[in-house]
């Protein structure tokens, strides 16, 4: 069934009848006020423009904003979940306070049996990549390393933390590289002294 929509406008005492649009009504019993989106509406004597068949410009902008935020949220959450699943399952997830006692940690992790510091083995000055790799391949339970700024105290000083024992102010290993390498091994769950 087709309905002919008409607009009646009273101007200067004369009624003006202007056809708006022929609208198809699929259900004969459906009334014009039932919310049919495709019905053309009048606003200030002009036809109100509709987008996607039934949305005003404001509604379309709100819908676009919500859809954009949804896409952004998915783009943030999916990589975060995927990256959090990349942990090595052979490394136990031990919770321990950063200000806790190292011997308590070694006992809790099963590395030593008693709270006896003589049972703990150390690797001293695991600063350079070579020393760090030797420390990671060793049987040492605790790694010790030094952090300083690249070029510390010189005109070439930069705000880049590096692994170097004073008085050295250069290194082939940055703190970021060192932490990445150590935390991706079993030793990453052992005490590290910086």
Image: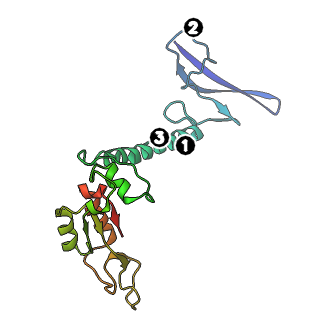
- The reply to whether callout 2 and callout 3 are in contact (CB within 8 Å) is no
Q: Are there few (<14), some (14-19), or many (20+) residues within 10 Å of tag 2?
A: few
Q: Residue furthest bottom?
A: 155
x, y percentage for residue 41? 63, 29
**Residue shown at 41% from the left, 58% from the top:** 101
Can you tell which quarter of the image residue 173 is in? bottom left
Name which of mark 1 and mark 3 comes first in the sequence: 1
| Residue 56 sits above or below residue 37 on the image | below
**Upstream in the sequence, badge 2 or badge 1?**
2
Query: What is the spatial separation of the Cα atoms under label 2 and label 1, in whole angstroms?
Result: 33 Å
**Residue 119 figure quarter:** bottom left
Please name the residue shown 57% across and 25% down the image.
39
Q: Position of residue 160 (x, y in %)?
A: 38, 76
The Cα–Cα distance between marks 1 and 3, rounded to whole angstroms, is 10 Å
Q: Nearer the viewer, residue 9 or 184?
A: 184
Most distant residue in the top direction:
29
Outermost residue to the right: 13
Which SS class for mark 3? helix
In terms of depth relative to the viewer, which is nearer, 60 or 145?
Answer: 145
Q: Which residue is mark 2?
A: 29
The x, y position of residue 70, in whole percent, is 46, 41
- Of the two numbered discs 2 and 3 on the same chain, state the one appearing first in sequence: 2
User: In the drawing, does residue 61 fall left or right of residue 188?
Assistant: right
Q: Left or right of 91: which side holds 95?
A: right
Comparing 146 with 123, the one in front is: 123
Q: Nearer the viewer, residue 175 or 146?
A: 146
Q: Nearer the viewer, mark 1 or mark 3?
A: 3
Q: Does 178 sit above or below residue 95?
A: below
Which mark is drawn over residue 67?
A: 3
Location of mark 1 (residue) = 61
């Amino acid at each position: 069934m087709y309905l002919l929509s008409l607009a009646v406008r009273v101007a200067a005492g004369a009624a003006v009848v202007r056809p708006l649009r022929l609208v198809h009504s699929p259900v004969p019993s459906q009334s014009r006020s039932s919310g049919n989106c495709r019905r053309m509406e009048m606003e200030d004597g002009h036809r109100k423009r509709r987008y996607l068949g039934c949305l005003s410009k404001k509604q379309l902008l709100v819908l676009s904003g919500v859809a954009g935020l949804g896409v952004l949220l998915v783009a943030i959450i999916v990589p975060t979940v995927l990256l959090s699943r990349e942990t090595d399952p052979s490394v136990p997830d031990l919770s321990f306070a950063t200000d806790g006692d190292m011997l308590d940690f070694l006992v809790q992790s099963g590395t030593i049996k008693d709270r006896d510091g003589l049972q703990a083995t150390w690797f001293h000055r695991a600063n350079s990549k070579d020393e760090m790799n030797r420390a990671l391949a060793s049987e040492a339970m605790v790694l010790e390393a030094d952090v300083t700024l690249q070029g510390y105290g010189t005109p070439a000083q930069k705000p880049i933390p590096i692994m170097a024992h004073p008085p050295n102010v250069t290194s082939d290993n940055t703190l970021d590289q060192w932490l990445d390498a150590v935390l991706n091994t079993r030793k990453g769950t052992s005490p590290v002294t910086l």
